[in-house]
C-alpha cells in the first residue's frame, strides 16, 4: 500500500485502536483484574478525538477529495442534510437485540459531578462525533475502501465510482464497525448512496455529521446513553 492509502487508514486505525483499548480495559475491570472507575474511562474519548483530529489536520493537504466547495450545490446539500436526518430517525429505531453486538453502556457524562469537567466531556463527545468521526470515517470508507475494492490503485478510481462488490462489502463492514450492526449497515448504504449521487466526499461528511449531531442532541435530551 502506498502513502495515499496510509494517510486515510492511520486516523481510522488510531480511532479503532482506542475502542479496542477501552474494551480491553473494561474486560479487565469486569474480571476484577483492574480497578478503573466508569468515570475515569470517560476520559479516553477526548484523548481519542483530539489525537485523531491532530492526525487529520496534519494530513489535510493530502485529502484532495475533501472539496468543501461541493457544499455550495444547494440541491445536493439539502439532500445530504435530509438523508442525515433520515438516518438518525432510522438509527434510534433499529436497536433490536438481534441486530446488536453485545451490550453497550455508551458514553454517560452524567457520571461526572463536576460541572465544568462534565461539560467539557460533553463538548468533546459532540466535537468528536459530529466533526472528527464523519471526516475520518468518510475518508476511510467512502474515499479509500470503496475505491480500493475496485482497484488497489485506488487513487486512479474516480470518487463515487459504483461497483456492486464495493457497495455491498463496504456497507456490511461499516455495519460491523458499530454496536448496532443493522443500523450501521443501513447508514453505510445511505452514505454510499449520497456518494454515488453527488460524487462528493464532502457531501458524505455533511450527511454523516448531521446524523451524529442530531443523535448527540437526542442522547443529551433523553439520556439514552447507549446510543453514544
Image: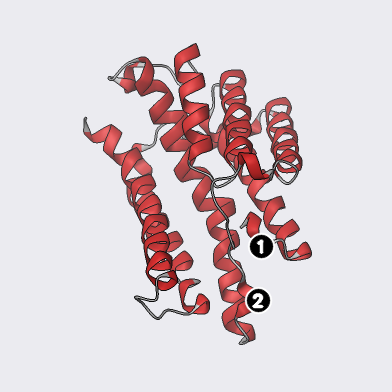
Q: Is residue 49 left or right of residue 181?
A: left
The quarter of the displayed image where residue 32 is located: bottom left
Binning the other alpha carbons within 10 Å of mark 2 as few (below 14), some (14 to 19) or many (20 upward) gives some
**Residue located at (36% from left, 48% from top):** 11
> Where residue 207 appears, x then y in whole percent?
64, 37
> Where residue 87 appears, x then y in whole percent?
70, 37
**Element carrying mark 2:** helix
Q: Quadrant of the N terminus?
A: top left
> Where residue 132 appears, x then y in whole percent?
50, 52
**Residue located at (31% from left, 45% from top):** 10
The quarter of the displayed image where residue 96 is located: top right
**Residue located at (72% from left, 51% from top):** 214
Q: Quadrant of the C terminus?
A: bottom right
Toward the left, the furthest residue is: 2
Q: Which mark is residue 193?
A: none
Q: Which mark is residue 225?
A: 1
From the viewer's side, name the closer residue of 83 and 73.
83
Rendered position, 149 above or below 12: above
Binning the other alpha carbons within 10 Å of mark 1 as few (below 14), some (14 to 19) or many (20 upward) gives some
Rendered position, 109 above or below 203: below
Asked whether the residues under the numbered discs 1 and 2 touch, taking CB atoms below 8 Å apart as contact, a structural biologist would say yes
**Residue located at (49% from left, 44% from top):** 135
Question: From where the camera sits, is residue 162 visible?
Answer: no
| Alpha-carbon span between mark 1 and mark 2 | 10 Å
Question: From where the camera sits, is residue 224 visible?
Answer: yes
What residue does disc 2 label? Answer: 110
Amino acid at each position: 500500500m502506498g502513502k495515499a492509502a496510509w494517510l486515510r487508514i492511520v486516523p481510522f486505525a488510531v480511532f479503532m485502536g482506542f475502542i479496542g483499548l477501552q474494551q480491553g480495559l473494561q474486560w479487565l475491570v469486569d474480571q476484577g483484574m483492574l480497578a478503573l472507575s466508569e468515570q475515569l474511562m470517560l476520559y479516553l474519548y477526548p484523548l481519542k478525538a483530539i489525537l485523531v483530529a491532530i492526525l487529520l489536520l496534519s494530513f489535510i493537504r493530502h485529502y484532495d477529495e475533501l472539496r468543501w466547495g461541493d457544499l455550495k450545490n444547494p440541491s445536493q446539500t439539502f439532500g445530504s442534510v435530509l438523508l442525515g436526518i433520515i438516518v438518525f430517525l432510522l438509527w434510534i429505531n433499529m436497536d433490536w437485540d438481534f441486530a446488536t453486538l453485545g451490550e453497550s453502556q455508551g458514553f454517560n457524562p452524567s457520571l461526572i459531578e463536576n460541572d465544568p469537567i462534565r461539560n467539557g466531556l460533553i463538548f468533546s463527545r459532540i466535537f468528536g462525533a459530529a466533526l472528527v468521526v464523519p471526516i475520518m470515517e468518510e475518508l476511510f470508507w467512502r474515499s479509500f475502501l470503496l475505491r480500493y475494492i475496485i482497484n488497489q490503485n485506488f487513487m486512479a478510481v474516480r470518487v463515487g465510482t459504483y461497483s456492486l462488490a464495493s457497495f455491498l462489502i463496504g456497507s456490511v463492514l461499516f455495519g460491523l464497525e458499530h454496536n448496532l450492526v443493522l443500523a450501521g449497515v443501513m447508514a453505510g448504504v445511505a452514505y454510499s448512496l449520497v456518494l454515488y449521487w453527488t460524487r462528493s466526499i464532502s457531501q458524505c461528511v455533511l450527511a454523516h455529521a448531521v446524523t451524529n449531531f442530531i443523535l448527540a442532541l437526542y442522547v443529551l435530551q433523553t439520556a439514552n446513553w447507549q446510543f453514544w
